[in-house]
Image (cartoon, rainbow, N blue to C red):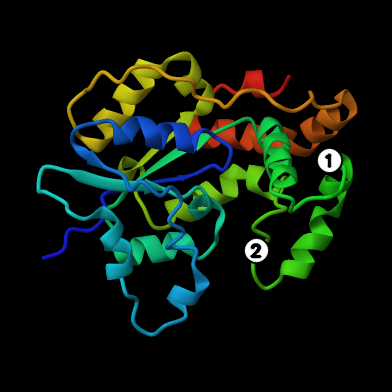
């Protein structure tokens, strides 16, 4: 009998999912594929077929011994609307890890990622203003590359996951926790995954800062845009997000 994947790091993009995945890969009881972001549950070609070939997915995790947990990090799973149902149908017992970042900082980091990959040519402010039009152009699909604001509305994505999975199968972290309290945060993840604590040498969580600071006008615009979202997230997760509001 093929053992299914045990956990997923489902988001958010630019929220330190790569760092968390790398740390977990060093645990002796965890298997994480060398290739990050397998993009299985957001692959529309795979799920258009009548029969889903999960062997394509499981091959990334072989060989897998009984004492190992397997998992992967594809942050678009949180954002991609059909993914929650697909993940549930694949393994209703799977555990989900969410690592969230201030949506204002996330949007700016996402923008510079797209610039670097030459998928963006507008200024930051113009890219934000163009996002609604780009969403229409991508319809009926979601915009994968220009969702700077939409990917920051975490509450709607989390609530969609909550329709399928109970709270005991979801762990929510702030990426600041991984940066400031590395060992404590990893132990929280180990406890959630029910594996022994393991001392992983601390490394840099974030890549070196390589782009200019955000303009105050753009930051203030985004603060207004996300103010209600941050309050809703505080209520949903019982978090104090006062540091995200300033």
The residue drawn where x is 56% and y is 21% is 240
Give coordinates of residue 16: x percent, y percent: 51, 33
Give coordinates of residue 95: x percent, y percent: 31, 46
Query: Which of the two discs, 1 and 2, labels the residue nearer the N terminus?
Result: 1
- SS label for mark 1: helix
Viewport quadrant of the C terminus? top right
Does residue 196 sit above or below 30 in this rendering? above
Q: Residues within 10 Å of mark 1 (few under 14, many from 20)?
A: some
Say left or right for 85 vs 143. Answer: left
Q: Nearer the viewer, mark 1 or mark 2?
A: 1
The residue drawn where x is 39% and y is 37% is 21
Which residue is labeled 1 in the image?
Answer: 124
Give coordinates of residue 54: x percent, y percent: 30, 69
Q: Is residue 192 visible?
A: yes
Which residue is labeled 2 in the image?
Answer: 142
Say left or right for 102 vs 76. Answer: right
Q: Residues within 10 Å of mark 2 (few under 14, many from 20)?
A: some
Farthest residue to the bottom: give it: 50
The residue drawn where x is 45% and y is 31% is 19
Q: Is residue 91 visible?
A: no
- Residue nearest the viewer, comparing 62 with 195: 62
Say left or right for 242 vs 17. Answer: right
The residue drawn where x is 50% and y is 47% is 75
- SS label for mark 2: loop
Does residue 63 sit above or below 173 in this rendering? below
- Residue nearest the viewer, comparing 45 with 86: 45
Give coordinates of residue 168: x percent, y percent: 31, 41
C-alpha span from label 1 to label 2: 20 Å
């Amino acid at each position: 009998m093929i053992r299914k994947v045990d956990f997923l790091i489902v988001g958010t993009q630019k929220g330190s999912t790569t760092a968390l995945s790398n740390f977990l890969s060093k645990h002796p009881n965890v298997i994480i594929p060398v290739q990050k972001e397998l993009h299985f549950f957001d692959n529309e070609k795979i799920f258009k077929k009548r029969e889903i070939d999960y062997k394509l997915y499981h091959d990334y995790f072989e060989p897998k011994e009984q004492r190992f947990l397997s998992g992967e990090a594809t942050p678009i799973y949180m954002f991609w609307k059909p993914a929650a149902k697909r993940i549930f149908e694949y393994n209703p017992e799977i555990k989900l890890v969410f690592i969230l970042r201030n949506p204002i900082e996330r949007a700016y980091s996402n923008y510079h990622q797209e610039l670097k990959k030459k998928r963006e040519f507008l200024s930051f402010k113009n890219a934000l203003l163009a996002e609604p039009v780009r969403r229409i152009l991508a319809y009926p699909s979601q915009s994968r590359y220009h969702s700077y604001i939409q990917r920051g509305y975490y509450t709607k994505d989390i609530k969609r996951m909550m329709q399928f999975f109970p709270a005991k199968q979801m762990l929510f972290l702030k990426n600041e926790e991984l940066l400031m309290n590395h060992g404590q945060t990893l132990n929280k993840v180990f406890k959630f995954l029910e594996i022994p604590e393991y001392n992983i040498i601390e490394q840099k969580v974030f890549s070196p800062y390589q782009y200019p600071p955000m303009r105050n006008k753009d930051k203030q615009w985004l603060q207004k845009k996300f103010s209600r979202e941050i309050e809703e997230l505080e209520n949903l997760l019982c978090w104090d997000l006062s540091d995200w509001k300033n």
